Image (tube, rainbow, N blue to C red):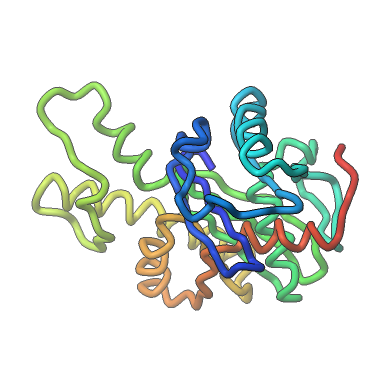
């Protein structure tokens, strides 16, 4: 991801996350990885090509094994990409859709990370498209970038459903309202859909969904689930 990298070694029941920048230096790799022998690595990256290539080189040198990279495509596993240019759909969103497809129902996939994305998937596997909004941290940063006196830390904020009486409360209330409006817009398009939440701000979204009486399932490893599914169902790179 743009901020953090999630990893999982399923056969050893090991998983975790680390700052994305840590992947640029093998000395910063998790201590848990020391001495582990892998046959293959599967990678999904939303970084630019140069940064992704640097990560690939570091991982291959550290583990001395092959690496396969996932890409978005027009169709896989009964999921039909809704983008006019399928390759332009972020691979993290694509893998989330592939994992959500296994529920065999109308699904709204919400990934609450650096960006907040919603993707609509019908029970027939048709991706209707999505919504992209800056995540909670990015909304706070964009609001206060360039201001000298007033600063609010995103980590100090919590969902707020009424007008704020401090700057922090007012910011939290506005962010909550913007996200709630987005969720309602998606719900109008797919009123009977299941909701899957993933991403670092997943709990923020759950509080808002509870307030809106939206029933959700929390799937913190949804993208990794999609990546694991691809391992069993290989499709050619575009």
Q: Quadrant of the C terminus?
A: top right
Q: Quadrant of residue 76?
A: bottom right
Residue 219 drawn at (x, y percent): 54, 68
182, 97: nearer the viewer: 97
Q: Residue at x 75, y 45 (%)?
A: 70
Residue 176 drawn at (x, y percent): 33, 56
Residue 147 lies left or right of residue 216; in this view the side is: left
Residue 227 drawn at (x, y percent): 71, 56
Above or below, 98 against 88 in this view is: below
Residue 161 lies left or right of residue 103; in this view the side is: left
Q: Residue at x 41, y 62 (%)?
A: 205
91, 140: nearer the viewer: 91
Q: Residue at x 45, y 50 (%)?
A: 31
Residue 182 drawn at (x, y percent): 48, 54
Q: Quadrant of the N terminus?
A: top right
Tell which residue pokes out farthest to the right in this image: 236
Residue 45 lies left or right of residue 180; in this view the side is: right
């Amino acid at each position: 991801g743009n901020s953090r990298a999630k990893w999982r070694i399923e056969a050893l029941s090991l998983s975790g996350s680390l700052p994305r920048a840590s992947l640029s230096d093998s000395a910063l790799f998790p201590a848990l990885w020391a001495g582990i022998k892998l046959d293959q690595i599967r990678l999904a990256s939303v970084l630019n090509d140069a940064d992704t290539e640097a990560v690939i080189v570091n991982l291959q040198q550290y583990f001395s094994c092959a690496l396969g990279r996932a890409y978005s495509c027009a169709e896989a596993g009964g999921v039909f990409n809704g983008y006019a240019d399928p390759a332009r759909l972020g691979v993290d969103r694509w893998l989330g859709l592939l994992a959500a497809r296994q529920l065999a129902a109308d699904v709204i996939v919400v990934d609450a990370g650096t960006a907040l994305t919603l993707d609509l998937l019908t029970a027939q596997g048709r991706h209707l498209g999505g919504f992209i909004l800056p995540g909670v941290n990015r909304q706070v940063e964009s609001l206060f970038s360039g201001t000298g006196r007033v600063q609010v830390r995103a980590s100090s904020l919590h969902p707020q459903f009424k007008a704020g009486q401090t700057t922090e409360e007012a910011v939290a209330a506005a962010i909550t309202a913007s996200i709630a409006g987005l969720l309602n817009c998606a719900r109008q398009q797919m009123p009977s859909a299941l909701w899957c939440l993933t991403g670092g701000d997943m709990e923020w979204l759950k509080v808002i969904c509870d307030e809106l009486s939206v029933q959700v399932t929390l799937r913190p490893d949804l993208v990794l689930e999609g990546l694991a599914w691809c391992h069993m169902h290989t499709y050619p790179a575009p």
